[in-house]
Amino acid sequence: MPSIELLNHPPSSALTSTTETWDGSLSMTFAPGEEIYGQDESADLIYQLVKGSIRTSHLLPDGRRQVGDFYYEGDVFGVETGPEHRFSAEALTTCEVLMVKRSGSAAFAPGRVQQLVWAATATELARAQVHMLLLGRATACERVARFLLDIADRFREELVTLPMSRQDMADYLGLTIETVSRMLGRLQADGVVEFAGCRHFRIRHRGSLKRLAAA
Amino acid sequence: MPSIELLNHPPSSALTSTTETWDGSLSMTFAPGEEIYGQDESADLIYQLVKGSIRTSHLLPDGRRQVGDFYYEGDVFGVETGPEHRFSAEALTTCEVLMVKRSGSAAFAPGRVQQLVWAATATELARAQVHMLLLGRATACERVARFLLDIADRFREELVTLPMSRQDMADYLGLTIETVSRMLGRLQADGVVEFAGCRHFRIRHRGSLKRLAAA
DNA sequence: CGGGGCCTTGATGCTGTTCAAATAGAGTGG
DNA sequence: CCACTCTATTTGAACAGCATCAAGGCCCCG
């Protein structure tokens, strides 16, 4: 059950760069695989991830799925351009999430929430544009290389943990799981990265990886 | 040479839904092919198309190009998430463009320009998300079908004029010109659309086209 | 009427998909 | 802690869709 709390959020991510405290927010915990909000549900809340990882995804009528993005500790998600969510959000790991109502104050009153929504929307747009370039004009190898670079840059740790499945990666990159797996295998065979189990890897030659990521 | 004028803009598009007059804006005319702003230039202006069509595009170091979007009469373009343009903008036809400074007033002062930038950013995000779905999970046939539907819905005329080249379409759809051409040919052969020269077409079976666009 | 760019069409090849099977890994209960 | 099971991942082989390469045709404009 959610309980109403006043919480300070953790150091915000470079992407969202929010500096406000979320007064009057609701905190909730989600189990892996659990849905945080659904596609086509009304989008009246915005969310911040205190702990854990989530993905947003859009399901087409025939079952094809596009993963919109992955969000990690500190990230803001759930901002939408219309009254309903175009993407759904699901927890990848156990997640702690702050939620705050977006409506209730007139659009563009100079309030904290509005500033937050604005910043998050701009961030979303930037991410969507980069993602568009990836999906439109990159080879399978480039997509996978850039994915590994992005996530490594996000966590800045020697040994990076992938919170998502191969299927999630594939649906994010616009590829199949087999192709993703093959590219990862090739990168490892070439000594560019090294996997310790399918969910943990380290970069061995960042230069090579960057070159393969091209762009 | 540009001259400073006070202009009322034409009825705004459904997408941007701006209702303000652009007081203090600059009006400029561009010839087909001319660049309106360049990739990596500083993004201090926002633009509205009074007349004509433009495309935005991003060039990768190796020459691959991704067209971000096409904009038509009434559309707002040029909003960016960072200080520099990620995409460049080029005139497809002879264009008349209004330009207004975005900086100079504090972010989120409740002014007209800020509201405009906000609305335009939200619109951009929505378009980018739809574009992402197209590039990530659609077949060549679906991409082309949706493109024709979109442009036909935008102009709402029996006979639609395509202001862009096949190369522009291909770079927008993440395909090659040959594939675009073949798909158009197939759609015409199937009686779904009918072309009158390569830049003009009409839809003959909207239902079929929608079914092919799938999504 | 002629030139040149854009577009279409055809033949071939490659990248990534599909289908299928083997293996690894995570979770569970003994 | 180990054995078992179930799912996720990897790997292999054949295939398909789209790209590439190469002509040929159309159309626009002088």
Image (cartoon, coloured by chain):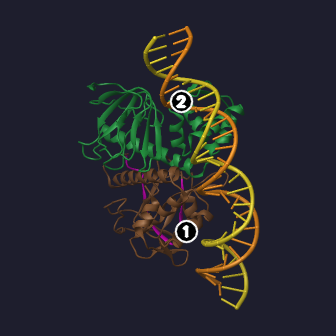
Chain colours: A green, B brown, C yellow, D orange
The one nearer the camera, B61 or A170, is A170
Q: Which residue is mark 2?
A: A162
What's the amino acid at mark 1? Arg
The numbered disc on residue B186 is: 1
Identify which residue, A212 or A117, lies in the foreground. Answer: A212
- Percent x, y for residue D6? 48, 28
Q: Is residue A146 above or below residue A81?
A: above
Q: Can see residue B103?
A: no
Amino acid of disc 2:
Leu
Q: Where B97 sits versus A176, above or below?
A: below
Q: Is residue B53 visible?
A: yes
Give me the C-alpha separation between circle 1 and circle 2.
43 Å
Locate residue B106 relative to residue B1 in the image: left or right: left
Element class at badge 2: loop
What residue range appears in magenta? B87-106
Quarter location, residue A43: top left
Residue drawn at (47%, 66%) of the image: B148
